[in-house]
Amino acid sequence: MTGLKIHQDKCVGCGLCVKTCAADALAIQNKKAVVNEACFLCGMCLDSCPFKAISIEKQAAPKEDLSAYHGIWIYAEQQQGKILQVAYELLGKGQELAKQKGCKLTALLFGNDVANEAQSLIAYGADEVLLCEHPLLDTQIGENYIDLFDQLIQERKPEILLFGATGFGRSIAPRIAARRQTGLTADCTILEIDPVKGLLNQTRPAFGGNLMATIICPNHRPQMATVRPGIMQVQPCDVTHTGEIIRVDYPDQDASKTASIELLEQVIAAHVNTIVDADIIISAGKGIGSQKNMELVKRLAELMGGVVGVSRPLVDIGWSEYQNQVGQTGSTVSPKLLITFGISGAIQHLAGIGGAKTIIAVNTDPEAPIFSVAHYKVVADCVEILKHMIANLEALPENGLLIEESKDKLS
Amino acid sequence: MKIAVCIKQVPSTNEVHMDPVTNTIIRDGKQSVTNPFDTYALEQAVQIKDHLGGEVIALSMGIPATERLLRDATSRGADRSLLLSDRSFAGADTLATSYTLSLGIRELGGVDLILCGKMAVDGDTAQIGPELAEQLGLPHVTDVLAIDAIDEQTVLCRKATDNGYQRLKVTLPALLTVVKDLNMPRMSSLPGILYSLDSPFESKTAADLSADPARIGLNGSPTQVVRTYVPQRIREAIVLEGDESQLAEDILNIYSEVI
Amino acid sequence: MDLNLIKPMHDDYTDYLRDESRAIGQADSISFPKNEYEVASLLKTLYAQGTPITVQGARTGLAAGAVPRGGHILNLSKMDHIKGIRQSADGHFHITVEAGTILSQLRKRIEQKKFDTADWTNESQQAFEAFKDEPALFFSPDPTESSATIGGMVACNASGARSYLYGPTRDHISGLRVVLHDGQIAALKRGDYTASGRTLSFPTLQGNQITVDLPTYIMPKTKNASGYYIEDHMDAVDLFIGSDGTLGIVTEVELRLQPLPQTVWGITCFFSEEAAALDFVISARDTMNQLASVEYFDGHALDILRYQKKHNPGFSKLPILPDHVNTAIYVELHCQEETDAVEGLKTIGQLLEKAGANPNDTWVARNESDRDRLLFFRHAVPESVNMVIDQRKKTNPMITKLGTDMSVPDQHLKQIMAMYHRMLAERNLESAIWGHVGNNHLHVNILPRDDEDYKKGKALYDEWAAEVTRLGGAVSAEHGVGKLKAKYLEVMYGQEAIEEMARLKQYFDPKGLLGAGNMIEPVKGEVSQ
């Protein structure tokens, strides 16, 4: 029987699982946990139980022969003929995984006139490049890629297939997974090979990064994941590394079938110093007290050569705009320096600042959760600190220099 | 135009906090809300209906209590709702969920346009839209930030990309996932709420949908969660002390050190 | 006493010279005491020196009560401990907080049932255990500025939208500790010391008995925060609530909590005719018992919002206002059962139709995010009016918002509204009106364009105070009297009552140093604006 099972012999009725359950599906009766029909098998309670008294029982899936699947594939996404950074990150991780599995690392390079990029994929670790060039691959229209992936997977049977969790990767990977009826894990930040079972352990943040979930795909192939850009390490370029470039054909097109999606225009937005790639972010939360204090935040950011970030409540109440919002529903940022004023640090917000190299948090509440991730803790009145910092910076005779300097570093 | 809007019930995540003693996740409120991204999909659907005529149906797979959120959708312009609810749907990953939703879409019949939120705020996978489109054999566009024009056959839309946007012409039927802020979701009106209390609502089980038992719920899910854990916070913040002007100076010193 | 507590004023403290009324005062020194003992020591020392003392919380008041008029600023913002909880015999829970506790922080703690109980007594900790098992409770007063301190709310007997149902702060205070001018402390629990007729007597912790003859005036039977609260057989606690820091320094407050309604629905109704809106208000308050608040926004207020939504990105998230409407009424239903709320909604639909309004022109909020959107809308009104004024202030620093806070008895609602509109039109003044129409309590905000407007506005204010008094109303219904409204007290109560108030004050403050300028108009000198 499929479902949540509570092992009566192990359960001591401590109630930790009840606290963890999001669905109100667990209760303690007669000093044992019992589950009701609200359970949707999310599995949160399994790890909450110190006594390992809860498990999810699953009907054994009919075993497909998985032994035919070999090798690790990474999709080397390119835009305008240039391979994205995340592809090299995937190669970096892929090398490590391939070494553990003792298999080949294959990069998929698809586009129109992209062959000259193949060699660099080899230099960064690919043992093999599957290259497909076709006019339909010139632009990022997802539906032109699905048949190609599908055909290659069926012919060549990779064990693992990884995508960068870019907008494009996250649009096509689910489609390919559904076509193959296999599993896909979104936005992974940790990938490891299970030393015993040899499966790919795919770990991703859940609940805004406060919880990590490790996911496997035991009975279906390929094991697919999208991987968050900026996390995996690029391995050094090795021009002596050799690999094979294999040209593959673009699948035959059904002549009667017309494209259902037509690209009318591709607009590349001019690069601006957005919050996503800023080196210095001065961010503000509701603790700054009043809308007028946003001016202080803006002024300080200006003086320090940084950009303004805000927590979601400030956007919600209209003190700032969405493009400044940091956090789970806003931008994920990775500045060298982040100074937060009056941000208490809801986990949705913390989810967006994990990449910051140095965090200085200013808040009046010494117990604010922001301090759990901060490098420097300042318990003080935000407005006072802002004013003092602005005054200090404005008073500096070399003020102009300081600003120029940091601007240089930003550009 | 027959438009289906997929809606997910999510926990109001701001209620989540850590128990410092046991290090377990605790959700006090446990109150569920409509996935915020889905509210934009619903509003878009209703605006299209207002423009072209037709019908908007709110669709969800979930526990019986999801009826409340589906009725809420009918207070904001959806005409009726369909809930796919069955014990055997529990434990579904995105593949099994999208299969189940595809049965719902087929059950509705003749759907011209499916709108989904870009992602759900609890899972953040953004996979349901594309997987559902694949299960139905329909074209899909993710991250739609504007619908410029629509008629019975085609939709002209703008899709946000990592570095700009694409303008696309999509032949219907199709599935679009929408980002936040492509519209201003309306408030329920008083007559809307009174309508929603008695609005047409159906709940279908796996058997009603003739679902393949091997493709639904936990059994139909290729992926499984083997472990959840709280990431270790190894860091202990350095506490800066002093009066405000001292603190401001200290902060500026750190600034000149790290930049 | 630690003499370092008293800090001479310097530039860092200029913010403490003003409050949300935008009036600016002056002072020689400031202190931030951390406990009652320090307050008592400061008071004793300063009082002996003859230094005027103005007490402050978060400075969110609108009547300049916290704006110092020379002397010393006693700022209680560092006294923000929550000291304990008790359950009274009738089952109610009461929380004791220091006066500097911020309302929004207190609310959060009550909601999460999370307190730092380490310093609490055993009794408190036990009561806290019982409190944790209790269904959700809340402290109902909801002034617009939730960053107000509890002490500040007590000083002006603050209200808020929901006081239509739950009453003002006064109704939710079950005890106070007050430091008197000579450093003596009175610990008052509601019910312990009540006046015999109009003679009030209570002891101090130092063992002295305070006995005072209360004034003889009668307060209006309307929402009121004007002047000392005086009634036959009144409770000693009530004398200090709404006394604007003029009788003593309230250091500790005990609040009574009540059950949080399970169902809270907010409905904003739009009207294309103000007359229809008022008809709706009158019929709704006559027939409905689920109403927790009934709020009003006039066409000018809505137009300012429309403008801000278009031009100010900060307000772009406001829901889209229907074009044809010129009045909005917000009502909030508080019910235990959802079925009651549905019934309420149906009634509202009928009343809207009866008033000639379209029930489709409504926004109903049944969940947190929708309630937040409606709250954003309501808060955007004063916020955007302030922005208009701040803009004008840049070219003419003389200009400041003139906002009224007057209430009248129910039967005069239409009359008073007609009067406001007529007189504003006659004087050709820009304005925006909003407020607690359920209590016939409107904030008429005059937005002067120049000095001339400002003078005309002030004159109008005087005329209204007289008219409101004639109708049996109050010149300050919730903001308190402070300094800005002191002169209207005389209009409202008459010369003799003012003299009685002055005598009462003199008893508690023989040198006239506490909250100087609040409530009782000084003979000369005025707060600079």
Image (tube, coloured by chain):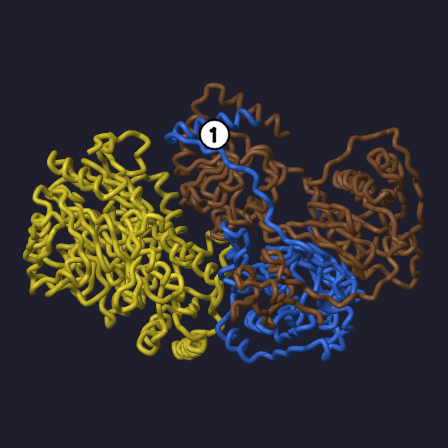
Q: Residue at x 75, y 68 (%)?
A: A59
Quadrant location of the C terminus of chain C in the rendered image: top left
Q: In this structure image, what is the colour of chain B?
A: blue
In the picture provided, is A352 more to the left or to the right than A168? Answer: left
Q: Quadrant of residue B109?
A: bottom right
Q: Is residue C235 left or right of residue C79?
A: left
Q: Is C424 or A368 nearer to us in this picture?
A: A368
A78 relative to A411 in the view: left or right:
right
Q: Which image quarter holds the N terminus of chain C?
A: top left
Q: Residue at x 51, y 42 (%)?
A: A372
Indicate the position of residue C3 as horizontal and vertical percent values.
21, 30
Q: Image quadrant of residue C196?
A: bottom left
Colour of chain C in the rendered structure image:
yellow
Q: Nearer the viewer, residue C381 or C307?
A: C381
Q: Which of these two is toward me, B76 or C242?
A: C242
Q: Is residue C422 visible?
A: no
**What residue do we see at 85% from left, 39% from top?**
A126
Q: Amino acid at mark 1?
A: Ile
The reply to whether residue B212 is visible in this rendering is yes
**Which chain is displayed in brown in the rendered image?**
A
Q: Please, which chain is the residue tagged with disc 1 on? A: B
- Tag 1 residue: B251
- Is B15 left, or right, of B35 in this rendering? left
Residue at (26% x, 39% y) in the render: C33
